[in-house]
Amino acid sequence: MYVGRSYKVVDFALWSRRSVLYMVVVSGLAVAAYRLPGIAGFSVPWSVVLVLGTTVSLVAGFKNSQVLTRSGEALQAFTQITASSRMWSNFCRDFLDAPTARKLIYRHIAWMTALRYALRRPMPWESMGKPANIEYRRRYHIQEDGGSIADELRPLLGDQTVDVLKSPRPAIALLELQSVQVNGLLKDAKVPAQVYVELTKLIRDFHDQQARCDRIKNNPYPRQYAIVSSMFVMIFCTLLPFGVVPVFADMGKLDGMLGSIAIWLTIPFSTLLGWAYMSLDQVGESSANPFEGNANDVPISQICRDIEIEMRAGLGESDLPKPLLPVNDIAM
């Protein structure tokens, strides 16, 4: 997640420069087609470009609105995980003996770790493999890229690590272990019934929030809408210079200082308009999967690290992990 005041114009321009290059080339072809003998005067009626541009605006706006909803829901899920984790820590420390509380809290941290790694795994429809995102990713670091789930779980789970990792869904396996231990505490009369009910509710909430995250991770923004939006944007931006070129050509026929160079204004103005549309689509496509690791994604690594520090500090520990600070104003 970008946490600076605003993106630098230079950074955004470099990230979206491929759309600029494409528009410059297409605009140059439009001018050449308009002036070359044999096809001189070739253009696309402006009314066609105008109708298509209106359609593209509506489709792109709908797509970006839905993408923003997905990102908001992902952030809400981790906000709820933060609140429930604090309650879990408080109940464990206040009503259980120290060794049991420590075991339940450490296993909860392990659950968040397993959830992080599950949400960071690459999916075929995600956009991290696109050249622009690969280049921009060099500006920041994703914690899950530099480690392994086994190395992070071992200090938290000890001998249970191997059994947990044998499960196809380690995060679910950890929640099941939490349920088993909490049920055992009730049977052994080591936890009051009222506290048992609250702990069970919290485990259910962790299941609910993980299900929300899994739904967002495992179900992409409907590809039919995503493909149609990108396709319409590309068609519009390709036809745009062919609709603009006669306008500037007519300006050159008027008495004025521009004269014959007026037609060449097609290139900068078409490039500017096309870049705006293509950048809007690029931003939407790069924000559609809020857990993959793009610069605008939910900072799940930072959130989980902050929760871990709080929970371990509550246990009285002093050797705490360091917070994950933003790198180049990007929090992960």
Image (cartoon, helix red, strand yellow):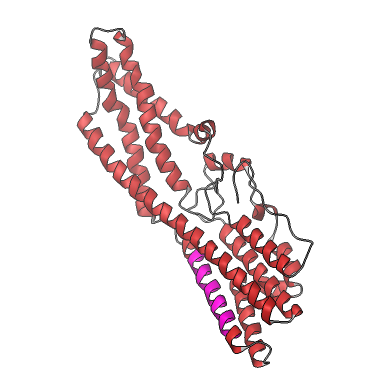
Q: Is residue 200 magenta?
A: yes
Along the line of sight, which residue is nearer the eye, 97 or 57? 97
| Percent position of residue 161, x then y | 72, 71
In this rendering, the answer to whether 237 lies above or below 4 is above
Q: Which residues are magenta?
A: 196-214
Q: Is residue 134 magenta?
A: no
Q: Is residue 93 visible?
A: yes
| Percent position of residue 175, x then y | 60, 75
- The residue shown at (51%, 65%) is 214
| Percent position of residue 195, x then y | 60, 83
123 vs 195, left or right, is: left
In this rendering, the answer to whether 189 lies above or below 46 is below
Q: Quadrant of residue 242?
A: top left
Q: Is residue 169 visible?
A: no
Q: Quadrant of residue 188?
A: bottom right
Residue lying at the far front in this picture: please name it.
94
The count of marks equals 0
Q: Main secondary structure of the magenta part?
A: helix
Along the line of sight, which residue is nearer the eye, 269 or 327? 327
In this rendering, the answer to whether 39 lies above or below 179 is above
Along the line of sight, which residue is nearer the eye, 25 or 90? 90
- The residue shown at (26%, 40%) is 54
Q: Quadrant of residue 254?
A: top left
Along the line of sight, which residue is nearer the eye, 312 or 240? 312
